[in-house]
Image: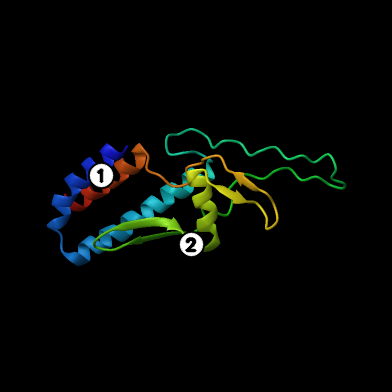
């Protein structure tokens, strides 16, 4: 995937250098928004960039719990909201990422790091779930957008 991205960067770099700075900034913002929508859809579908589903949550031990037991919700329900997932683009770069406390949660899952679920809970290693990443459709989206602009 990195080779595809490098090849796309080399191909697009020559073409983008010929654009005016304002047109380049407008293109970058448009691409950032399209990539954010693509990432949002993938997170909602609970899929890694390679198309595999996210690893399941660790089962909870609810034997001692009294009262109504709610079903476990899907992971990352609020993560794809536009208030948490931000997209920026200027003449030099495009960024899609998370803000605030959500960024920490996303980073822990993205790289499979250790974290505490609650303040006094034990530290647990989380399974890696790639929240952000490029897939072939994203690279094709970038390529098609650039070709539409330049033709």
Asked whether, in this view, residue 19 is left or right of residue 118, the answer is left
The residue under the point 61% across, 36% down is: 56
Which mark is in front, 2 or 1? Answer: 2
Compare marks 2 and 1 and give the one earlier in the sequence.
2
The residue under the point 27% across, 62% down is: 26
Q: Position of residue 148 (x, y in %)?
A: 22, 49
Q: Considering depth in this image, is 57 or 87 the residue closer to the camera?
A: 57
Residue located beneath label 1 in the image: 143
Residue located beneath label 2 in the image: 99
Q: Secondary structure at mark 2?
A: loop
Whether tag 2 and tag 1 are in contact, CB under 8 A, the answer is: no
Asked whether, in this view, residue 34 is left or right of residue 9, the answer is right
Bin the neighbour count of mark 1 within 10 Å (Cα to Cα): few under 14, some 14-19, many 20 and up.
some
- Cα distance, mark 2 to mark 1? 28 Å
Residue 55: mark: none
Q: Position of residue 36 (x, y in %)?
A: 41, 53
The residue under the point 37% across, 50% down is: 35
The residue under the point 76% across, 45% down is: 70
Q: Secondary structure at mark 1?
A: helix
Q: Looking at the image, which residue sits at the far right? A: 66
Bin the neighbour count of mark 2 within 10 Å (Cα to Cα): few under 14, some 14-19, many 20 and up.
few
Q: Considering depth in this image, is 1 or 111 the residue closer to the camera?
A: 111
Q: Position of residue 121 (x, y in %)?
A: 69, 52
Asked whether, in this view, residue 136 is left or right of residue 6, the answer is right
Colour basis: rainbow
Report the label total.
2
């Amino acid at each position: 995937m990195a080779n595809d991205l490098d090849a796309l960067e080399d191909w697009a770099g020559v073409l983008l250098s010929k654009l005016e700075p304002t047109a380049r900034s407008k293109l970058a913002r448009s691409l950032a928004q399209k990539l954010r929508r693509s990432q949002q859809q993938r997170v909602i579908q609970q899929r890694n960039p390679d198309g595999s589903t996210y690893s399941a949550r660790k089962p909870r031990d609810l034997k001692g719990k009294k009262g109504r037991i709610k079903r476990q919700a899907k992971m990352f329900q609020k993560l794809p909201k536009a208030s948490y997932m931000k997209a920026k683009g200027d003449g030099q770069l495009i960024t899609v990422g998370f803000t605030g406390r959500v960024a920490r949660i996303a980073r822990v899952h993205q790289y499979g790091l250790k974290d505490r679920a609650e303040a006094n809970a034990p530290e647990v290693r989380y399974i890696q779930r790639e929240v952000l990443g490029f897939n072939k459709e994203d690279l094709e989206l970038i390529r098609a957008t650039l070709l539409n602009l330049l033709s």
